[in-house]
Image (cartoon, rainbow, N blue to C red):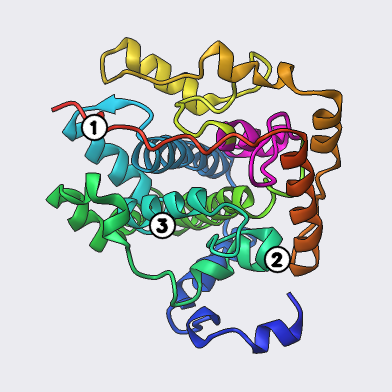
Amino acid sequence: MTSTETLALPRNERLNWLTSLPFFAVHAMALFAVVVPFRWEYVLTCIGLYYARMWALTTGYHRYFSHRTFKTGRVFQFVLAFVGASCAQKGPLWWGAHHRHHHRFSDQLEDVHSPLQRGFWWSHMGWILCDRYADTNYDAIKDFARYPELRWLNRWHLVPPVLLAVALFFIGGFPLLVWGFFVSTVLLWHGTFTINSLSHVFGRRRYKTTDTSRNNWLLALITMGEGWHNNHHYHQNTANQGWFWWEIDPSFYVLRVLSWLGVVSDVRTPSEAVKYAFRSYSPEERAELRRTPALVGTRSRALVQAARDRLQAAAELPAAAPAPAPVLRR
C-alpha cells in the first residue's frame, strides 16, 4: 500500500491507536521472555497452549461457526466458542460473520482482508486494528446469534483470555504468564493471520476458483491444517481441508476422534467427484492455474482480473459452495 493510498483511507479504515493499544501491549509483554528465567516447562506450555487454542479456532470458529461442517450439541458448541475466544481474536459471532463475508467476496474489492486488493499489512492485521470492522454483523450469522450464551460470549469475548492469563499467573507466576499467555498468544495471532495474508499469495493451485487461494504445506503445519486453502475455497463446506493423505490436517484428525466418541456427528467430507474434479481440466486450464499471479497490493489487480478472464474463457468457473443447511443437534 503506497503512502498516497494510506492518506486516502477513510477515517474508519485507519489504524485506531487507542483501541489497538492492548494488541501492541501483548506484543511488548512477550518480549519479557528474554528477561525471565528460562525453563523448558515454559516453552512446552507455550507450544501446548498454541496448538490447543489453534485447534479451537480452526475447528470451532472456522469449520463450525463459519461453515457448519459438522453437528454437535449446545454444550460442546459453547465449549468450542469459549476456548476459541481464549485466542483473543474477538467473539465467535464476530469472527464467523466476517469470515462468511470473506468467502462471499473473496479477492474482490469488498473482501475485508484480501492481500491482492489491499496489500500484506492490511490483510495480515490492518483490517482488525481499524474501526470499520469492529462491530458484529448479526444478520450474517443469524443461525448462531439466536443463542443467548453465544451473544453473551461475543460481547464479553475478553473473559476467556483474561481467565487463562490469571490462571497461568497463579500456577507458575510471571514467567509462566509471559510464556504461556503472551508469547503463545502473539504466535497464535500471527499464525492465524498468515492464512489471510499469505495463503492467497504463496503456494499451488489445484482447483479453479474465482479467487487466487493456494495450498501451502508450511501454513498447514502452522495452523493445524488451514493451509490447504485452495481446497477450502473450492468447496468450503467440508470439515477437512486436507483432502489427500499427504495433506496434513491435525484439526480434522481430532474432529474425527470426537466423532468416534459421539461428541460430534455428520462430519462432512468432499465427495470423490469434488476431490478429483481437477482431472477433467484441460492442459490450458492447468497451465493457467500455474500462471495465476502471486502478487499483493493494488498493482496486481489487473493481472488477477486477466487471470480470471482467461480461466473463464477456458471453462466456466464453478460457483462457490452453497451455504450449508442448519445442522445443530438439539
Left or right: residue 256 compared with residue 81: right
* Secondary structure state at the residue bearing disc 3: loop
The amino acid beneath tag 1 is Phe
Taking the spot 34% from the left edge, 26% from the top edge, the residue there is 70
Q: Residue at x 23, y 40 (%)?
A: 78
57 and 289: which is toward the camera: 289
Asked whether residue 106 is in view, the answer is yes
Q: For the residue marked with disc 3, what is the amino acid?
A: Ala
Q: Residue at x 69, y 34 (%)?
A: 215
Instruction: For the C terminus, give its image quadrant.
Output: top left
Task: Check disc 2: other Cα within 10 Å, few if <14, some if 14-19, many if 20+.
Answer: many
Between 300 and 50, the residue placed more toward the observer is: 300
Badge 1: few (under 14), some or many (20 or more) residues near its Cα, within 10 Å?
Answer: few
Quarter-of-image position of residue 214: top right
Instruction: Indicate which disc, 3 or 1, sits on the residue closer to the N terminus.
Output: 1
Magenta span contains residue 213: yes
Pair 1/2: label in front: 2
- Asked if residue 104 lies left or right of residue 267, the reply is right
Q: Where does residue 29 sit, x and y in percent of width and height?
A: 53, 67
Nearest to the observer: residue 261 or residue 159? 261
**Which secondary structure class fits the magenta region best?**
loop
Q: Given contact means CB atoms under 8 Å apart, are the residues at marks 1 and 2 in contact?
A: no
State the image coordinates of residue 175 (x, y, percent, origin top left). 49, 55
Label ID, residue 76: 1
Marks 3 and 1, how far apart at CA: 19 Å
Numbered range of the magenta stretch? 205-233
User: Viewed as shown, does residue 211 lie left or right of 322?
Assistant: right
Which residue is identified by label 2?
Answer: 119
Disc 3 target residue: 88
Instruction: For mark 2, give the secondary structure.
Output: loop
- The answer to whether residue 156 shows anywhere in this view is no
